[in-house]
Amino acid sequence: MENKKGTIVISGGSRGLGFEIASQFLEQGYAVATFSRGSTEHVTALADDPRFFWKSVDGSDYQALIEFLKEAQQRLGNIVGLVNNAAIGADGVLSTMRTSDIDRALDVNLKAQIYLSKLVSKKLLQNRDGFIINISSIMGVRGLPGVSIYSATKAAMDGMTRSLAKELGRKGIRVNSVSPGYFASDMVKDLSDDILVKIERRTPLGRLGTQSEIAKLVLFLATEGHFITGQNIVIDGGFTC
């Protein structure tokens, strides 16, 4: 079913921040196509919504992404934007990390996003319009111990953002990064209360962010930020200032 506003592709949109972003686009009248490894109760609840399409996909499988995008366009209509959201944590001292964990983080956090950007940008170029928004992290702009691989993947995404913005800008396509700080999510659920208190004290606004606040920034860049491209916008309550 063709949607008048178009279809937004979101990687990792079955839970957490990805699902919040998907929900806000749906509220604004867009269709949403998203994928993840496994289903969730959120995905199940939207199974009957004709504007929502979810499929189990390994994002590092290039052929699987081709098939997903083909099916998404057939079901929902013209693709007008991409949000590269999928990511996994990769905590640990580099010298003792397993190479399998390094490879997995590179596959999910970077390789899959590059593949998806390549495929979706082809569709946006046909329209000479659209956007790509990469969900990065403050870990990509400042160093912290124990997250070198995660930080490397996010810094790489920021570099791709700047280059793609120049590459696609004259075709009417905007490319930006959003770098959240600490916010209420699965990423921080295992942190101790003491650590969370320290984070809040180091944050000028005195609290963690929310998924809704980050999703609203993504939505603004997609729908209102028509003269914004090539930027990495940090949303962290002042943590990195």
Image (cartoon, grey):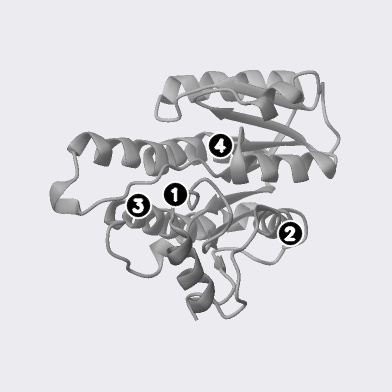
Nearer to us in this view, 178 or 199: 199
The answer to whether 20 appears left or right of 151 in the picture is right
Residue at image coords 52%, 62%? 182
- Cα gap from disc 1 to disc 3, whole angstroms: 17 Å
Tag 2 or tag 4, which sits nearer the N-term?
Answer: 4
Tag 4 or tag 1, which sits nearer the N-term?
Answer: 4
Name the residue type under label 1. Asp
Tag 3 or tag 1, which sits nearer the N-term?
Answer: 3
Kindly identify which residue carries mark 4.
11
Give SS at disc 4.
Answer: strand
Nearer to us in this view, 218 or 38: 38
- Cα gap from disc 1 to disc 4, whole angstroms: 24 Å
- Cα gap from disc 3 to disc 2, whole angstroms: 26 Å
Name the residue type under label 3. Tyr
Compared with residue 223, is residue 68 higher up or lower down, i.e. above or below?
above
Nearer to us in this view, 199 or 114: 199
Give SS at disc 1.
Answer: loop
Kindly identify which residue carries mark 1.
190
Nearer to us in this view, 67 or 210: 210
Name the residue type under label 4. Ser
